[in-house]
Amino acid sequence: MKFEELPLTEAEVIKLKQLCLEARSLSYSPYSKFRVGCTLVTSEGEFISGANIENASYGGSICAERSTICKAVNERKYKFKVIAISSDSQEAISPCGICRQFIREFGKEIPILMFGQEGNTHELMNLEELLPKSFGPSWLGVPEA
Ligand SMILES: [Zn+2]
C-alpha cells in the first residue's frame, strides 16, 4: 500500500508519527529493554497510544500493539484507520504473529505504519499483506468490524 492511500490528513500523519515515537516512553520493558510504542487512530479520529509491557513471567508480557488495542477496545473503540508502531531499532519492525492476528479481529485491511527509531524511515503495509488468507470473525458468523 502507498503512503498517499492512508486515510489521514498530512497534519494527522505528522501527529501520528510524533505520538508513536513518544509512545515508546510508556514501555515497561526491564527485561528486554526493547521499547515498542504504538499509536492507533480510531475511525472518529482519536489517537490512542500504548507500549509493550513485560512481566517477570515472560509469557505474561504483552506487545505494544495488543496493549494499545486493549486500551481502545476498553473505550469501546473498535474501528481503526491506521495503526503505527516504532521501536528502539533503527529499522522499522513489523508486528509479531500474535499481534497480526489480534489486529485482524478489527479489520482485514488496516494500514500498519512501521517507523524506524528516529522516525525518518518507515514501511507501510496493510494487514492483509502481513497476514494473507487470515482467519477472522466472519468464519465464526460474526460480522467483520
Ligand atoms: Zn506482538
Image (cartoon, grey):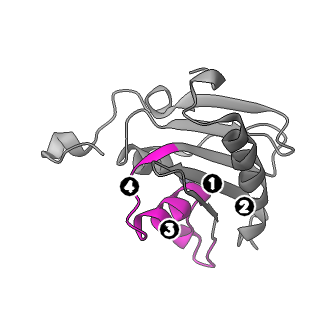
What is the CA distance from the residue labelled 2 to the residue labelled 3? 13 Å
* Front position among marks 2 and 4: 4
Q: Which residue is mark 3?
A: 71
Please, what is the three-letter code of the amino acid marked with disc 3?
A: Lys
Q: Amino acid at mark 1?
A: Thr
Q: What is the span of residues highlighted in magenta in the rendered image? A: 54-81
Q: Which residue is mark 1?
A: 39
Q: CA distance from mark 3 to mark 4?
A: 10 Å
Residue 123 visible to an observer of this rendering: yes
| SS under mark 4 | loop
Specify which label sits upstream in the sequence, 2 or 1: 2
| Image point (55%, 46%), residue name | 96
Disc 4 crowd, CA 10 A, few/some/many (<14, 14-19, 20+): some
From the image, tell me which residue sits under label 2: 23
The residue identified by callout 4 is 78
* Residue at the image point whose x is 67% and y is 43% from the top: 12
**Which residue occupies the foreground of this view, 18 or 65?**
18
- Confirm or deny contact between disc 3 and disc 1 (CB under 8 A): no
| Disc on the earlier residue, 2 or 3 | 2
Earlier sequence position, callout 2 versus callout 4:
2
